[in-house]
Image (tube, helix red, strand yellow):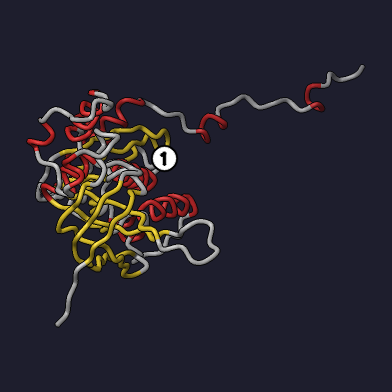
Amino acid sequence: MDLNVVTITGRLADDPKPYATGNGGDVTMLRIAVGRPKRPGQQRSEADFVDVAAWDEQAKLAAKYLAKGLRVGVTGRLQQRTWETPEGKRSRLQVVAGQLHFIDFKEQAEQSPHQANGRAPTDADAAAPSTDAAAPSTDAEVAESHADAPQPVIEVVVQADGGARGNPGPAGFGVVVMTPAGEVLAELAEPIGRATNNVAEYQAIIAGLERARSLGAHRVEVRSDSQLVIRQLAGAWQVKTAALQPLWAKARDIADGFEQVIFTQVPREETLRADALANQAMNRQGQVTDPAKATAQQPPVATAAAAEAPRG
């Protein structure tokens, strides 16, 4: 009979990382350092680092009560998590927590009776007065503020659009970052000076990926009506224009930092909000001087021979 049961005890190597899933659920990722037994003559013990996923109510409690350096016990099961990247399939082994044992708490510096019995704290525990006189009341306030703080999302959709009036001409881009359900998380409208349509399209996607990264997203779908840019980023077409090559490289570099990025070409009707933001950006900067025309309009510089007066 197969058995998949894991029990570990260790200290958090980082602060808990809480996320909100696309369907409204909660998950908190924990990275736990589990010490190995010392070998004879070894000065310091080594540690293995284990990724643990806590879901739903346990996710909320872990985010509220745990912090880097605190001890926690986990009982759960092993799970192989896989995702696709442009380089191929990637995978990582993690523990899905069935039960968390809170050995240390963020509010309390010393062990309390609740910690000794190894059970997870409840809302009643959080409301009960602390039995540790040395624990400052501000710790509870900090914990509450962390619990109420906006949580990153696992999956987002980036609508990107860029344009230039004159191609090249005054250019700008618009970006809308939203959840798969359509909740808008961020909007961007940025002028970029004089550029081509394709440069503006790339700048829009780069800005959208950067904002998705700052929101803590793991998976991103980029939607744009630019067939050229989407097919180039998806690897279907080569990037032959020298001016686009560094932009392609930057976009791919950011994309590779996610678990999954999908580039989707969509009709213009599906990116109307991003298109409106791009037009706002272009309107804000007004006219942009063409460097070539500006140079051509400059008065010619007299040569030394022409400037020299004739001798009598």
- The quarter of the rendered structure image containing the C terminus is top right
Which amino acid type is marked by label 1? Ala
Residue found farthest to the left: 124
Can residue 260 be seen by looking at this rendering? no
The image quadrant of residue 153 is: top left
Quarter of the N terminus within the rendering: bottom left
> Which residue corresponds to the image point at 62% horizontal and 24% vertical from the top-left?
299
Q: Is residue 187 left or right of residue 311?
A: left
- Above or below, 136 against 217 in this view is above
- The residue that appears at 47% across and 50% down in the rendered structure is 243
**Label 1's element?**
strand
297 on left or right of 280? right
Q: Position of residue 223 (x, y in %)?
A: 23, 51
Quick one: 28 or 120, which is closer to the camera?
120
Q: Closest to the observer: 9 or 204?
A: 9
Of 244 and 52, nearer the camera is 52
Q: Quadrant of residue 271?
A: top left
The answer, for residue 256, to whether it is visible in the render is yes
- Above/below status of 149 relative to 119: above
Q: Nearer the viewer, residue 251 or 88?
A: 88
- In the rendered image, residue 80, in percent from the top left (x then y), is placed at 25, 68
